Amino acid sequence: MVRAGPALWLLPTLRETDGPELTNALAVRWQANLIGRCRCGAIANVAQDADGMFHATWLHEADCPASDEALAELLEKTGRK
């Protein structure tokens, strides 16, 4: 389903201190969010809540750098929140 209207995308910023591994993971995540499909094959599962807001969830492959688990580990390793 495609809907026209305003959208808010929350994407983390890159920092010079992030290092190549985190920079790559964030880039993969950005691309997945913007096109609706991750390079690991995950697609956005979009659902509407009771307030009419749409939320996307992803089921990334275990080795995907864009998964929540992989990003959380990298963010912790670099001291980012």
Image: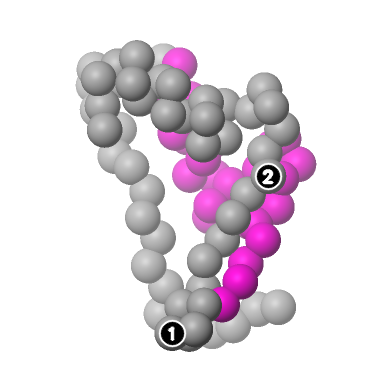
Q: Amino acid at mark 1?
A: Asp
Residue 5 in picture, x, y percent from top left: 47, 84
- Res 64 visible: yes
CB within 8 Å, label 2 to label 1: no
The residue that disc 1 covers is: 51
| Dot 2 crowding, Cα within 10 Å, few <14, some 14–19, many 20+ | some
Circle number at residue 26: none
Q: Closest to the observer: 20 or 79? A: 79
User: Residue at coordinates 76% horizontally, 41% vertically from top-left?
Assistant: 41
Question: Splitting the image into 4 quarters, where does residue 42 fall?
Answer: top right
| Image: magenta residue range | 21-48
Q: Relative to residue 78, is residue 34 drawn left or right?
A: right
- Given residues 80 and 36, the one toward you in this image is 80
Rendered-image quadrant of the N terminus: bottom right
Badge 2 or badge 1: first in the primary sequence: 1
How far across and how far down the image is residue 78, in percent? 30, 16
Q: Quadrant of the C terminus?
A: top left
Give the residue furthest to the front. Answer: 50
Query: Is residue 25 covered in magenta?
Result: yes
Residue 5 visible? The answer is no
Disc 2 to disc 1, C-alpha distance: 24 Å
The residue beneath circle 2 is 59
